[in-house]
Image: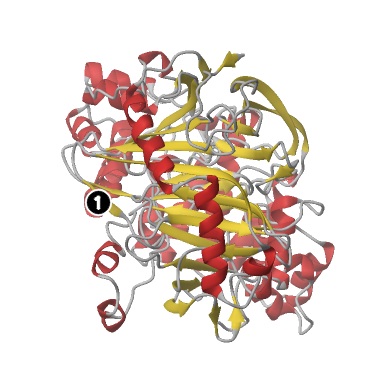
Amino acid sequence: MVTGGARTCGGPPRGNEGALATTVRRTALNLPAAPLGPENPLPPLRTPAPPPVLDPRERAGLPRDMARQLGHRPLRTLLPTRLLDGYGRERTPTDLDAVVIENDRLRVTVLPGLGGRIHSLHHKPTGRELLHRNPVLQPAAFALNGAWFSGGIEWNIGATGHTTLTCAPLHAALVPAPDGGTMVRLWEWERLRDLPFQVDLWLPDDSDFLHVGVRIRNPHEQSAPVYWWSNIAIPETPDTRVLVPADEAWHFGYDHALTRVGVPEADGLDHTYPLRSEYPADHFYELPDGARRWIAALDADGHGLVQTSTDLLRGRKLFRWGHGKGGRRWQEWLNGPEGGGYAEIQAGLARTQLEHVPLEPGAAFSWLESYGPLAADPAAVHGGDWATATGEVAGRLEEALPRTAVEEAYAAWLPYADAEPGEVLATGSGWGALEVLRGGHRLPGTPFPTAALGEQQQPWRELLEHGTLPKPAPDGIPGPTPVSPPWRDMLETADADPHTEYHLGIAQWHADDRAQAVRSWERGLEKDPVPRWPLLRCLAVAAQEGGRPDHAAELYAEAFADLGGPGATGLAASEAGGALLVALARETVEAHLSAGRPGEARSLLAGLPGTVRERGRFRLLLAQALVAEGDTEPARAVFDAGFEVADLREGAGILGELWALVSDEPLPDAYDFRMSPPGA
């Protein structure tokens, strides 16, 4: 146990000289959890869904910085990360490593092994849980790379969407705090944008507010696009109201239209009450220049959570699920039947989540956020005058935590951002250590020691130090590929064996040099590699992306057949081999369906192991194949038998669309995940 200092910082003194000093301890949090499963071994080559493209006339009416940042350097791929889509829906009691930061006022529970998520923020004097504390850990396909879970406070860095680090371990350690006590530091290397970042959790003695110092650094010689949103899940009741100092907002729904609306009402509906709207949507609030940055969610009694920050973190957002069937179904899907409802309030670097902010070479973004309880007059909070409601909350916030106190806490924290970590609480990935080894970066406060290098990084260390990429593992499954320009340059000068050509093609594909990528993969095949499926599958994706579905289906069929070849010995017996079989089978079936070959799709499905065929995703694929062949009655029978697609994507309409082809009846509630009105 670590004990903090005796000095209070970040809130008005309470005169309680006998207050318990801040402590930090490790513990285990037991939750019903669905295992994440192994990484998908197939590199994610497909282009993510692009952000909405606004009409030039719409852009002309936007603030200049917003117009410039919309669509700024969108992701070409999710490389170099891997997809996490091997989870299911069966939950069993599971111990999760947790760190508890606690004083007399607050108890903060952090999950360093799951993106550093703050799971709980408990206010001890009132006994209130300030966050939506999810009673289960149920992955769902909301993150950029798949697995995501709801609840608590999530640190979103990378690109538009939920971070690829949502379910990944972060480095965590104790560091000195400005008040003489101890902070918990979380840090990692974010790989989509190739940037290191840190999150310092500082709970001063006898303070009602948790301070969170964040820093994102760009150690490279070129600018980098930065995305950050702190995502806060708050309990939702019919009387929950979200308050923010804004009279306008940007509404973004699942029709992907960005429109300016009034606050609190638009189209006769007060959208600051999340449950009054039927369908899910985002509201990005337009905070006036110079206004204090804050957002609060308060219940019928005027009690709840407030988040505030220094001015750099300018954006504030409400995400609502709404009261419609689809939103309610998603809530149950994520939280379990007894998990209760939630909404999200968020804070970000830009006005909207469609923007990425340039960070210059050698520069850093840093700011301080504060989270704590707030109590305001419920008559004012829920009254008919918006200015009175927000003025009441702003006044109570100023009493509880003055704006100057936040600025002073930031100034006090910033010199400690470089403090070297002490006792290690958790270990993240080895990718940061590999980048530091390659680039010689000096990153005070966030060490990435070579001891953190693991199995996935070792081949690349050998390439770095000896110029040669070692052969793949005995199972023939290639590991992940670093794709930044320095690694691509090293691959281009390494021995051109099939394994190197495979990785070089992936790096070239990521750089949008697709013709060269295809040529690298073709050169690899010309050398008769064993196995052949890694290169064939890459060429199949290239054919799909190039608008040649027939050729893609043929290449996929050849790749899938190669799994039974001499290079695949013992594949099915290993966890990675099982994940490969599932991933390649799914893509191959989908390719056959895209090429108008439902018969081939059904034949492949019929030959899969029973445990694979019975997965929800493959039951859905069977129904799609049956409908494509005109066999609607057997397809309807698949629905009637019941199935759950564990990795159903947020916003996916496939279940409703397919149901409409097999039945004239209303879509059953179990399959209703619709995020927008029918036909929208």
- Looking at the image, the residue that sits furthest to the front is 15
Please tell me whether residue 40 is drawn above or below residue 518 in the rendered image. above
Q: Is 536 placed left or right of 638 in the picture?
A: left
Q: Is 120 placed left or right of 144 in the picture?
A: right
Residue at 55% x, 74% y is 386
Residue at 50% x, 55% y is 346
Residue at 64% x, 71% y is 674
Please tell me whether residue 303 is drawn above or below residue 41 in the rendered image. below
Q: Is residue 525 visible?
A: yes
Closer-to-camera residue (62/536): 62
Res 36 quadrant in image? top right
Identity, as a three-letter code, of the amino acid under mark 1: Pro
Please tell me whether residue 618 is drawn above or below residue 490 in the rendered image. below
Q: Identify the colour scheme used.
A: secondary structure
Q: Quadrant of the C terminus?
A: bottom right
Binning the other alpha carbons within 10 Å of mark 1 as few (below 14), some (14 to 19) or many (20 upward) gives some
- Residue identified by numbered label 1: 358
Counting from the top left corner in percent of width and height, residue 108 is at: 62, 33
Res 470 quadrant in image? top left
Counting from the top left corner in percent of width and height, residue 591 is at: 50, 60
Secondary structure state at the residue bearing disc 1:
strand
Counting from the top left corner in percent of width and height, residue 56 is at: 26, 80
How many numbered badges does the structure rendering display? Answer: 1
Res 30 quadrant in image? top right
Q: Is residue 528 visible?
A: no
Residue at 22% x, 49% y is 516
Counting from the top left corner in percent of width and height, residue 662 is at: 73, 78
Q: Quadrant of the N terminus?
A: top right
Please tell me whether residue 24 is drawn above or below residue 255 in the rendered image. above
